[in-house]
Image (cartoon, rainbow, N blue to C red):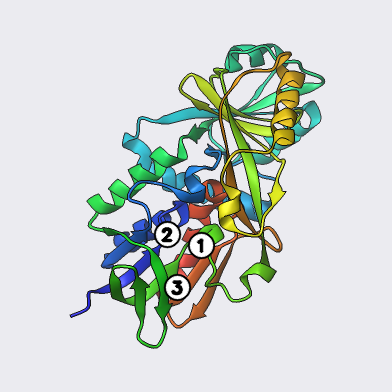
Amino acid sequence: MMDRYEAIVVGAGIIGVSIALKLVENNMKTLLIDKCGDSCGATKYSGGVFTRILDDEEEYRWALKSHRFYMRYLNRADFINWGYLIIEETSLVEDDYEEYKRDVNGLRIVYPDEIPNILGIEVRLDDEMGLLVERDFTVNPGQLLEFLREVYMDMGGEFQRANYKGYSKECKTVKLDIGELSYEKLFLCLGPWGEDMPGRYSLSRLISIPIYKFDVRINVGYWDETLYGYFRVDRDSMVGGFYDAYPISDVDQGFGVPYDDSVSYALERINLRLGYKPNIDDMWRAPVALSLNFKPFHKQVAKDVHVFNGFGGRGLILGPGYIEDCLDNVLE
């Protein structure tokens, strides 16, 4: 007899894992499927930055909910680097502080003479201050995924390594390279690989974002308006992403080594802020599927079949909160 699950989740990135955790919390017999035994895919190769400070009001609300999600599960994790510092013009810092201080715990203004001590490096400041969110964090996203998957399995969820081959809405079965499984509800969380979305390539754009690992140690993760990039702590290095992106037509093009001109651009921007060009220990690219309006979306594509997509590289920040908004209605 074919194994039957109340819920099957395909894709064990941050979106799939977040959904799977919520399903087992609702006492549903749940199977999480991924092509990798360990973490892989776009989430693993993302920047690994979490902050609740966002310009968009709706995304800000999702980020607040995501933060509560992480605090619920990460109380025994030892790989989080706490603190996220945003460096921007003084007027923007002051405005943001007034807007966010009601909801964001551990939020404080950091003045220019404090910033070198916090970052552990000298910086060149030009009418700028910092806004430090002490309870936001940076994290190695691969470690985060593996940790959350273990939490999910400790709660009774099942995991299967397999290659997804599609589904039959008539038979309510998922097709895998190892056979077929029966579902009551199916959640497709394939990120850039989400080809089951009807009209997927007209609804979204595929891009690839370069990320670098520098031999510079900082004390907190930070976003820098001058560099126009974000950074996270990673042992004796910092990992940084710059918004230099390449359009791609296929997800697999999104991985690999950044182009030479992007490497030069990254080093020039770092030199602008720090006064020297650091060595690059490692560099990679991460594919991102951007929805047409740059918002995440959830769509029911068949009876009891749901697609979550379009997080645009912000799944760590927005994903759990967005799912919190959507999933209760799906499960009714």
Q: Is residue 177 left or right of residue 215?
A: left
Residue highlighted by disc 3: 330
For image coordinates 68% across by 25% down, the residue present is: 130
**Amino acid beneath label 3:** Val
Q: Which mark is residue 11?
A: 2
- In primary-sequence order, the first of circles 1 and 3 is 1
Frontmost residue, 186 versus 104: 186
- In primary-sequence order, the first of circles 3 and 2 is 2
Badge 1 crowding class, 10 Å Cα cut-off, few under 14, some 14 to 19, many 20 or more, is: few
Q: Is residue 157 left or right of residue 249?
A: left
Q: Report whether residue 107 is seen.
A: no
Quadrant for the C terminus, please.
bottom left
Kindly indicate the quadrant of the structure image that contains residue 184.
bottom left
Name the element at disc 3: helix
Q: Which mark is residue 170?
A: none
Name the element at disc 1: helix
Residue highlighted by disc 1: 325
Residue extending furthest bottom? 170
For image coordinates 69% across by 11% down, the residue present is: 113
